[in-house]
Image (cartoon, coloured by chain):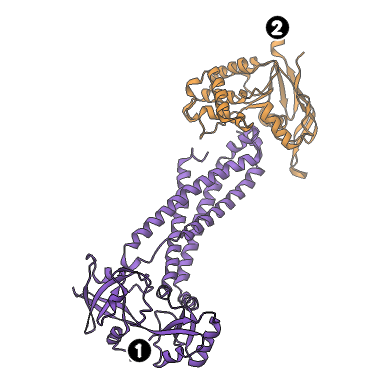
Chain colours: A orange, B purple
Amino acid sequence: MNTPAVHCQQIHRHFGDGDTRVHVLRGIDFTAASGQITFLAGPSGCGKTTLISVIAGLLQPSSGSISLFGRDLASMPPDDAVRLRRKDIGFVFQQYHLIPALSVAENVAVPLLAASMKRRDALDQASTILDQLGLGDRLHQPPARLSGGQQQRVALARALVHQPRLVICDEPTAALDHETGHRVMELLAASAVHPDRAVLVVSHDNRIFHFADAIAHMDDGIITSIDHPNSSAAA
Amino acid sequence: MLRSDRAKCTAMILAVTFSVFLMQNQCAILASLYRMMTAQIDDVTDAPLWVMEPDTRCFEQAKPVKDGALERVRSRSGVAWAVPLLKIDTMARSDSGLLCTVTVMGVDEASMVGLPSRFRIGQPGGIRPAGTCAVDPGGYAQLFPGEPVHFPRRIRILDESLILTGMTEASAPFTGFPILHCSRATALRLNKAENRTATFIIGDFTPGANRDAVCQNITAATGLSAMDRSGFGEMARRFYNNQGVPRLFWITIAIGLLTGTAITAQTFSMFVREHTKQLAVCRVMGVTKARIIAMVLCQGLFVLSIGCAFGTGLAALTTRAAASEPFLRGIVLPPQVAAGTCAALAAITIAAITIMARRIALMDPAIVFRS
């Protein structure tokens, strides 16, 4: 059985007080297992972004418990949460969020530099993973010179370079055309999935759902259902 | 991050450059004006005691002392020695016919006290003969514009002919007029408007004498104002301060500081606001707040350093260019002014960045998940 990397129990999160109080997460029970790609799907405003912010330790839940690799995140001091993010979580964003002033290799090296690795070693490690993702010839270029698909591959390299145990992808194909998005997902499935790593993808693009091992459907702040498309196909 | 936004980076560097230049230029002029206010007092290094009429406010606006004052000053206890110094403002005509207002300083022939400490060309003894004098470098350029420096040269003052025998290292005066140093006997021949024979009595205190007490003693006995060199300089600066000119310079300096502060702080604020997402990405990836703030601070200091270097360079160039102009030759850029203005702008920039740092600290990193 796969180890749960993320385990959420009765997560509630609200914003504001009194009349302006908005209850965004209304008792989320959710698990993402290592070695699998878990999708979090649902319409805009259903609370997906808030949930991944809570899972990433960027937001504290109003109530409920959440554990990452067996460690209770809700009671974790903020500095420990930063260290956990730096070491164990990789991020892929919808708009890539590459730093334009840095070269492709430097962008990928950011998580390693943040962990105080020596610059040369960090750049070497970044070059290796960029080679693996087919961008070995773009190391010194600024990200602005790359296509959308290439930029997302750089973002993927940045998310994986420090060998995290959880990769969080926020709408990784939303800014890409279908074909490029499909290729990025293939690359994600091929390079990110690892027995010791969970991959959590937030998406409402049902054309890529077949990459999922599990799909948690969200609506109005709760998980409404969980599908396992690959198991049902096998059955 | 800032380097990638060349337009903003350039705007910030230009803002700092302009601000530093404006402040340094105006500070340099102001500092030089302050020095010029007391230039002729400071040039007389061998006479620390100055005695003058009570109505005298500064070197340029001095009323001649009454005859007999010299002996009365010399007779006071605590006065080691005292000699007269005659100052006249008059018109000179060069051999090419150029008319120019000049300040003539007649020094005691025997002691030659009252001369600047150094001569660029010639010797102090060269002005001892009647009808000779020495001119300062700026004065020579005004009397003989564009002509090579050579001596002797002839000028006329009223109906008297004078031979220039050398060039002193007299400091640039506040008035900008040429400074001619000659013997008092020569100066007396040029002094047609007044029948007084001295403008100041200058001298020295006996060793160990209480300077304040000696000055009070002289004032009580003679009715003249007596003070040491620094006291006279201070009185002159106070007088000029009340004339309003320094205030105008302070206003310009303040404008430079405000402009630099406003542009730099505003551009930095815009920069941080526009790059909030990039900074948030760094936070999400585990870069600490302190490190991000240090990163922004480094970029601010980078802009500041380049701007200060350009601004100081520009101010130094204009000051250097001004030094070759006879009327502007006293203007210099003191290192303290350069360092002080850069430090002032650095303090303001760091304060602006600190305010921005607070914004970064309060930033919600989860914004990276919002498109």
Up the image or down, B6 lies above or below A234; here it is below
Residue at mark 1: chain: B
Total numbered badges shown on the rendered structure: 2
Q: Which residue is mark 1?
A: B197
Residue B135 on image: x %, y %: 29, 73
Residue A17 on image: x %, y %: 76, 43
Question: Is residue B200 or residue A111 the one in the foreground?
Answer: B200
Residue B364 on image: x %, y %: 66, 39
Callout 1–callout 2 Cβ contact below 8 Å: no
Up the image or down, B155 lies above or below A25; here it is below
Left or right of residue B69: residue A235: right
Q: Residue furthest front?
A: B207
Type of the residue with mark 1: Thr
- Answer with the quarter of the image where residue B69 lies: bottom left
Q: Which residue is mark 2?
A: A234
Determine whether the residue tagged by mark 1 lies in a helix, strand or loop: loop
**Which of pointers 1 and 2 indicates the residue nearer the eye?**
1
Q: Residue furthest top?
A: A235
